[in-house]
Amino acid sequence: MPSREQRLDRLCVSLSRDSRVSELQLRVTDRADTFDYGSAAPGSRATHAIASSTKTFAAVLVLRKVAAGELTLQQPLVSILPRNDLTGLNRFGGVDRVDEITVRDVLAHTSGIPNYYAKKTLNPKSDIAAVTAADPGWRYDDTLEIARRMNALFAPHSGRAAYSFTNYQLVGRLIETVYGCSLAAALDRELLAPLGLRDTALLTPDTLELFDAASPLLYGTQSYRGARRLASLGAEGALISTTADTMRFLRALVDGEALDAGTLALATTDRLPLFPRVSYGVGVMALSLPRLITRLPRPGMLIGHAGMTGHMMFADPTSGLAVVGTTNQMAVPRLALRMLIGALRAAR
């Protein structure tokens, strides 16, 4: 019978044969440190864009302030950010909800604030490489203005959730306000340096070379050259990292190093449906997959996050099994899901 390593090797070879996969990378570990598997496509770069998996890093920074008693999740966001930033972002029912939006709302996508990024979607029939390379990116104020021109779906904390990148533009500014420094500096000082994540950094307009040094991204079969687009995302999804660093962060999250058990419970227990089989807590996705598919020892949930670059990081809190990987593919998310499920099955 093939070993776990051999089964995982076969999975990586199979996925890498798909022309839509760019520089596949995969890492699988267990809680007891008895198993640590890593694979990278031959000749691949060390780093890659982790996209929306950045949101969990950002949420941890805010949750640490909550744990320290310096913030509460129920605190009105207007008590921290300028009222002008929030005015008009949610006018559900003809009423400006500026005073109703809480810290938790933006972290958990329960604010009802429209998703400005819906106006930034790419036409798959266009020349993706040319369009994305020419895109100058956008500023924080631009994202808010776009959102103000869109319709809110519901009032804040009304029992519904809707994924909105605008929320994490506000989370990024919240972090800069409460930490008194740039988002990049806060991430480095509070998370990256303490956890030894030496190969992780925030892509910004001043560090575009990080994009060029990372694994190339594909949008379907086309090259994606949107360095400035990704740099505009900030806390939404601008981190560049490695599977080793992202696994280190994921293990620190689920094993109680990044957050204490009570604070992690705040992030994971009160969740709302967001996508099929995905519910969302405070900056953390919970993915429910049938036991028959994953072969995990018991039914449950995987916690972590996924990103539009084909990046995913998920761990099973029960067994301690954790999977981090990327396909570097932006238009075919099922490839990343196939990698995750295949890795879970092979590692059992």
Image (cartoon, rainbow, N blue to C red):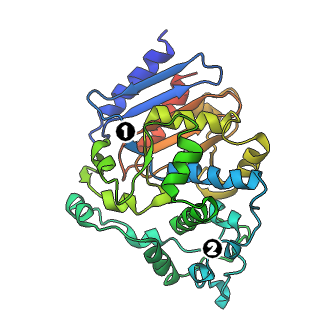
Residue type, numbered disc 1: Thr
Identity of the residue drawn at 54% across and 59% down:
181
- Left or right of 267, for residue 165: left
Whether residue 281 is visible, yes or no, is no
Determine the CA span between mark 2 and mark 1.
34 Å
Residue assigned mark 2: 81
Residue type, numbered disc 2: Leu
How would you rate the neighbour count of disc 2 (Cα within 10 Å): few for under 14, some for 14-19, many for 20 or more? Answer: some
Residue assigned mark 1: 47
Whether residue 168 is visible, yes or no, is yes
Quarter of image, res 289? top right
Q: Nearer the viewer, residue 161 or 299?
A: 161
Q: Is residue 91 above or below residue 209?
A: below
How would you rate the neighbour count of disc 1 (Cα within 10 Å): few for under 14, some for 14-19, many for 20 or more? Answer: many
Position in image of residue 68 (x %, y %): 76, 52
| Most distant residue in the front direction | 180
Position in image of residue 52 (x %, y %): 49, 53
Identity of the residue drawn at 28% across and 67% down:
135
Of callouts 2 and 1, which one flags the residue occurring earlier in the amino acid sequence? 1
- Left or right of 212, for residue 255: right
Position in image of residue 228 (x %, y %): 32, 61
- Left or right of 89, for residue 212: left
Quarter of image, res 204? bottom left
